[in-house]
Every structure is written in C-alpha cells, then in structure tokens.
Image: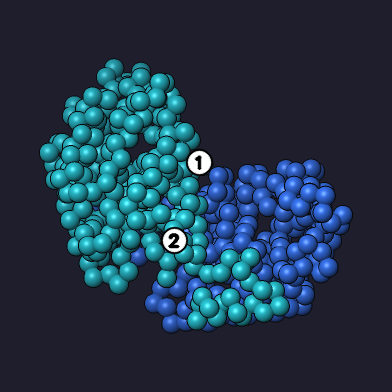
Chain colours: A blue, B cyan
Amino acid sequence: MRPQIVLFGDSITEQSFGSGGWGAALAHTYSRKADVLVRGYGGYNTRWALFLLHHLFPLGSAKPPVATTIFFGANDAAILGRNSERQHVPVEEYKENTRKIVHHLKECSPTMLVVLITPPPIDEEGRKEYARSVYGEKAMKLPERTNEVTGVYAKQCVELAKELGLPSINLWSKMQETEGWQKKFLSDGLHLTEEGNAMVHQEVVRVFNEAWLSAPDMPYDFPRSSEIDGKNPEKAFLQQCL
Amino acid sequence: MRPQIVLFGDSITEQSFGSGGWGAALAHTYSRKADVLVRGYGGYNTRWALFLLHHLFPLGSAKPPVATTIFFGANDAAILGRNSERQHVPVEEYKENTRKIVHHLKECSPTMLVVLITPPPIDEEGRKEYARSVYGEKAMKLPERTNEVTGVYAKQCVELAKELGLPSINLWSKMQETEGWQKKFLSDGLHLTEEGNAMVHQEVVRVFNEAWLSAPDMPYDFPRSSEIDGKNPEKAFLQQCL
C-alpha cells in the first residue's frame, strides 16, 4: 500500500540502519508515508551488482519502488595490485554498469525517481590505519584506495547523471568542503561516522524534496490520532480507509 | 523475496526508527535477511488499530509477514477524566481487541510468529513534567497515565499471550527491575530513551531467537562478497541466484 524507497549499494548502504545511520533516518523522515528498504551489499562493486538486478527489481512488478538510490563506486575504485584489487572495476566499466542499472530501473518503472550517489572521499591515512589493524605488519604501505582515484569515479558518476537527466549527490566533493572531513565524516577512511551519515541523510532528503518526493507533501497512510473523534472513531476511518 | 517483519503499534513503534531506535536496530540485526516494516501509529489505542487491520494485513496476501510485534496498551491505559481520556479503552476491551488482532494475523498466516509487547512502565513525575511543558499552568495536577493502571494492562497482555500460546515481552516488569528506570529508560515518562530502545531491541531479538527467527541461522539473500571470485564472479551467483 505504501510507496517504497529502495537503497541499493554497497556496505555504506548495508550499514545505513546501524546507529545514527542515514537509511534509518530516511525511514524516520518518511514515517507513515513510505517504506525504506535496504538493498546494501558489503564489498560489492557495480559488476557484481548487475547479477542482482533482475532479482531485486523484477520487470513487470505490480509495485516497483517510487525511488531508488544507487550508491556504488567505493569498491570499484579499489586499486589494482593492492589489498582490495579483487573488487576493482575500471572506471569506464563502472560508468557503463551504473548506466545499465539505471536503464533497468527505468524499464521497471519509467516514473521511478533514480538518484546517483558518488562514493565518499577517501582518507588514505585512515585506510592505512585500518589495514594495519587487520593485517598487522603485513599491511601494504600503500592504501588500497586513494582519494584521487575515487574522485575519478565520482566525476564519472556525476557526468552519467547529467547525461541521463538524473539528480546526483556528489559526496566526494561535498564532504571535502568541510575542514577535517577525514575524521569528521569517515570512521576508517571510507565508511561513515554519525556526522557522515547525517550528511548523506540530509542530501538525500534535499534531492528527494527537489524532485517530487517531499515527505511533508505526502499524505499520511491513515488518520492522525488528533483527527480521530474518541466518541465516533469510525468517521475518520470511513473517510480515509474504506 | 525477503521475509518481512512488521512492527505494529503506537508512537513507541512509530518512533522506533528515530536515533538509536529499536526498529532500526532490528532492521540492522536482520540486515540482508529480512525487511523490517514499521506500522506504528502515534496516539492509537487497540480500538483504533482494529480499523487498520484489513488494510495492513490483507487476507489472502501472497506474502504475509513472517513475524509481527503487537505493541499497544500505553494509550488504552490513559485514565478517564484526565488529559488523554480520549484515548482510553477499558482493560477488558484492550485484551479482546488484542485477541482480535492476533486472530486476524493468524488467519493471514497460521505460521506467523506473533509477539505481544506490554506497554512500558509510567514515570508519573515525568508525565507531569511533560504536561507542564505542553499545557503550562493549566496542566492537570494528576498524571494522565499512572504506573499502576498501566501495569493492569501489561498483566492482561501477558495473560493473553499465555492463553494463546504466544511469546510476550513484559516491558512493564522488565524495566522496573533496574534502579532508576524512570529516567534511564523513559524520556518523558512514557517514550523510550536510547537505553530504553536498546532494551526493547534486545528483548525482541531474544524472543525471535527463542522462536525460530534467529538472524544468524537465516541465509543471506545473495553471496557475501568474500564468497565471490573476482575472476569468475558468475560462479557464486549461478549457485545462489539462478
């Protein structure tokens, strides 16, 4: 009955219902108006995401999502020859895979609001500390992701959104506007702190509002309790439910 | 595709995706295994909840929830002749309404795991402070809910669960086992603090685990990234998705 908003992405989406997470905050913003479903897959790049498309978004669904965020790239941008090279996807392929995801979603529902989110920036020191905590002395001296390379992916993400006429959120740029972004927004050089989550939440709400999916403008699914007459409750429900 | 867990209740359920909320925490616990949908209606009592039943849980649904929590009573227990009397429902009717909700859910799906949650205890001082903050000098000297009366509703909730052979969570008792529960678990004498939310989350997970809905025992919806061979990703997806 309620419209659905789907969050499709990697670990930054999967973790978005953790404490202070942007997904949970979004569900709260759309409380009693839309359901927010997490389809976050830790470690996934866009190449692997393509395998899920028809399962998560079947063509011919009677009730496709009204909106979907696509939030990959952080793993695609892992650098060849370093710790996470298994996840690497060349930037041209990242762009084409993302295009395929968008096309599929639009085939599911031409009216679906699709929002592209770039990967966040990388705090290379944070990544190296993280690697040392996992691999100890064996950790590579060079970080498995760099801010510069991730920026290339972010740029292609924003360009693709422009080509396709979609809204996008350039997290990579936006976060770096704030001094101390490295520790303020990122917990391990890549994943989000509560403040990082708050920024993603705020940006997604802003973009949804600028499109047509503004929570304050959406109807409640059922009467608010203040509209219910204690002596004659049927009245409110007859008007809105039957 | 994923099983659904529905949280049906009043404002304590509606707010469960706020910061530190028990609903969001539950969604995180069942990450990649089940979807958690909030059906919380602030201010609602069980009498009003009945109007929603067939809308929220249509009979003959191809995919009813695998589990539902029923968490009302805090508003039913509002006292006649005081500020919130509009929400009052006599305790016998509260019990019968809750029984109707359970019967309907079991008619939707005989295998559905239905868990009854009692209202939390009431910190009457907290309620009076809250009333003063809203109504100022006009606030009634007597709280609109009392801990004793709410306890009567909690007792009936637990008794009903026993009659029906359902698991229940006696929040009213459980919270009062901890010294300082009034401010530790309740923010305004009725709604939950982060610690109160944490307790509800912990209790729901415990009861789900003791039944058959244990997150660690449930399969992931798709391969974990560690199972995917970077050079031959098809393999993992062929096994699990097609």
Kindly state the secondary structure of the residue where label 1 is placed.
loop
The residue where tag 1 is placed is B20
Residue B35 horizontal side relative to residue B108, left or right: right
Q: Position of residue A101 (x, y in %)?
A: 60, 76
Q: Nearer the viewer, mark 1 or mark 2?
A: 2
User: Number of labelled discs?
Assistant: 2
Res. B151 image quadrant = top left
Q: Which residue is mark 2?
A: B218
Determine the residue located farthest toward the right in the rendered image.
A141
Q: Is residue B164 above or below residue A162?
A: above
* Subunit that carries the residue with mark 2: B
Q: Chain of mark 1?
A: B
**Secondary element at tag 2:** loop
Crowding near the residue tagged with mark 2, few <14, some 14–19, many ≥20 C-alpha atoms within 10 Å: few
Q: Residue at x 51, y 75 (%)?
A: B240
Residue at 66% x, 50% y is A192
**Residue at image x 46%, y 38%?**
B198
Viewport quadrant of the N terminus of chain B: bottom left
Q: Image check: A197 left or right of B71?
A: right
Q: Position of residue A104 (x, y in %)?
A: 56, 80
